[in-house]
Amino acid sequence: MRLATIAELPAVVALTSAAYQPYTDLFGYPPVPVTEDYVPRIERGEVWLREADRAVVGLSVIERHADHVMLFSIAVSPDAQKAGHGVAMLRWLEDKSWEWAVPEIRLYTNARMERNIALYCAFGFQETGRRPNPYRPGWTIVDMAKTVDGSKKVGAI
């Protein structure tokens, strides 16, 4: 994993849009990560890229806070899906959180993203609540969290 540069903004936007396309089709409207302005996130060092065979195949957008890391988005190129890149990025994030001595990883997702929720649960995240999406009437947000413990890393997915 490496930090994205401003020059890679078009690749970040294209990969995010392609990865979330099935959900855009399902919802009839793009999920929040698709409409995000990634310039400030790249400038703040929040966008991390995963490469395979010298090509960007995935990305993670993470916010570092004093008491947690917020996983804003994780996306894998449709051509690279089902090859373990998503799980590898979650493992990387867990290692990075432990390295930063941050005790928890948090995320939120749409309740209709059942496949993603199942993946997060298999990786050790637990649902911490549900709430209405303040920007998208009728949508429900699922909040999830995972305690980071370097001595008990989950690796069996």
Image (cartoon, rainbow, N blue to C red):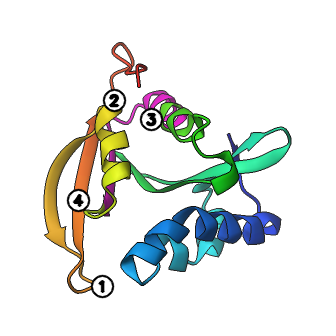
C-alpha gap between disc 1 and disc 3: 29 Å
Instruction: Identify the secondary structure beneath mark 3.
Output: helix
Report the side of 45 relative to 33 (left or right): right
**Residue corresponding to mark 4:** 142
Q: Position of residue 53 (x, y in %)?
A: 84, 38
Q: Residue at the spot x=52%, y=80% of the render? A: 35
**Residue corresponding to mark 3:** 97
Question: Viewer-nearest of labels 4 and 2?
Answer: 4
Q: Position of residue 99 (x, y in %)?
A: 50, 28
Whichever of labels 3 and 2 marks the residue nearer the N terminus, that label is 3
Q: Amino acid at mark 1?
A: Tyr
Whichever of labels 1 and 3 marks the residue nearer the N terminus, that label is 3
Labelled pair 2, 1 in contact (Cβ < 8 Å): no
Quadrant assignment for the N terminus = top right
C-alpha gap between disc 4 and disc 2: 20 Å
Above/below status of 110 relative to 45: below
**Residue corresponding to mark 1:** 135
Question: Viewer-nearest of labels 1 and 3?
Answer: 1
Q: Which residues are magenta?
A: 92-109
**Residue corresponding to mark 2:** 148
Q: Position of residue 27 (x, y in %)?
A: 37, 78
